[in-house]
Image (tube, rainbow, N blue to C red):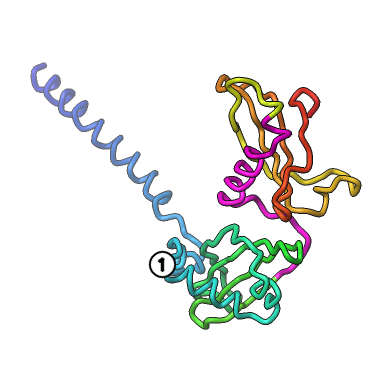
């Protein structure tokens, strides 16, 4: 009986090891899931953030392009964002270090969306249209400063009111002056979050064009 008990105990001790091995064998195929060939071969450095030098090169390449010569000459434009751009094979620019530059041309009231090939030093793609890209941080700060010195805004602010948020504003109808002009809506209110006033700022002419009580917004 002692021999039988010993054999039984030995069998019980081995059981967990077999179960563990079984679990590992099931998990193994999942860890070797195949990735698309273009992902495996992609250079990870292409996804790195743009360096200050690359941003400067991208902006210089864009502003030297004759298609945006008027924007550069007048100088009334704002860079909205610069970011790395990666394309997959079989695109001709696959494997190239690319930068996307989005700007707004105040002089022509248009958006500029460009793809810069940093390896070749050329503008690989350029789109000029009447779209409205998001506001840059500089534009948000400018809108607040314009609203803060406007007499109509100052006269309607209550004690404790301060700028709460700055939003990109695009008029809903063609009768609205902001329908075709770069504009921002600056919300004023108390620190508890209660809004009291909305100031619409025309960023092209840099002036407040409308002041609306928050309850009527």
> Percent position (x, y) of residue 82?
54, 62
Give above or below for 86 relative to 12: below
- Asked whether 40 falls inside the magenta stretch, the response is no
Q: On the rendered structure, is 197 left or right of 31? A: right
Q: Residues within 10 Å of mark 1 (few under 14, many from 20)?
A: few
Q: Residue at x 77, y 22 (%)?
A: 215
Quadrant (top left, top right, bottom left, bottom right) of the C terminus: top right
Quadrant (top left, top right, bottom left, bottom right) of the N terminus: top left
- Taking depth in this image into account, of 109 and 127 the one nearest to the observer is 109
Residue at the far top in the pictured view: 1
Give the magenta-colored segment's residue range: 127-154
> Percent position (x, y) of residue 203?
70, 51
Q: Residue at x 65, y 21 (%)?
A: 158
Residue at the far left in the pictured view: 2
Give above or below for 215 relative to 85: above
Q: Which residue is mark 1?
A: 45
> Percent position (x, y) of residue 106?
71, 62
Residue 45: quarter of image: bottom left
Q: Residue at x 45, y 66 (%)?
A: 40
- Asked whether 143 falls inside the magenta stretch, the response is yes
- Taking depth in this image into account, of 166 and 2 the one nearest to the observer is 166
Q: Residue at x 67, y 61 (%)?
A: 104
């Amino acid at each position: 009986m002692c021999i039988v008990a010993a054999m039984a105990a030995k069998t019980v001790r081995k059981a967990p090891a077999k179960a563990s091995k079984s679990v590992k064998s099931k998990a193994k195929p999942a860890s070797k899931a195949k990735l698309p060939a273009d992902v495996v071969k992609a250079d990870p450095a292409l996804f790195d953030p743009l360096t200050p030098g690359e941003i400067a090169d991208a902006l210089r390449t864009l502003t030297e392009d004759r298609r945006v010569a008027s924007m550069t000459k007048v100088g009334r434009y704002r860079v909205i964002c610069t970011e790395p751009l990666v394309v997959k094979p079989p695109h001709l620019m696959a494997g190239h270090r690319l930068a996307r530059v989005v700007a707004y041309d105040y002089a022509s009231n248009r958006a500029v969306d460009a793809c810069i090939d940093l390896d070749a030093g050329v503008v690989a793609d350029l789109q000029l249209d009447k779209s409205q890209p998001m506001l840059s941080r500089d534009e948000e700060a400018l809108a607040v400063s314009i609203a803060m010195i406007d007499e109509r805004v100052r006269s309607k602010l209550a004690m404790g009111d301060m700028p709460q948020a700055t939003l990109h504003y695009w008029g809903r109808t063609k009768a609205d002056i902001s329908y075709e002009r770069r504009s921002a809506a600056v919300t004023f209110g108390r620190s508890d979050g209660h809004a009291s006033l909305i100031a619409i700022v025309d960023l092209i002419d840099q002036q407040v064009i409308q002041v609306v009580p928050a309850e009527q917004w």
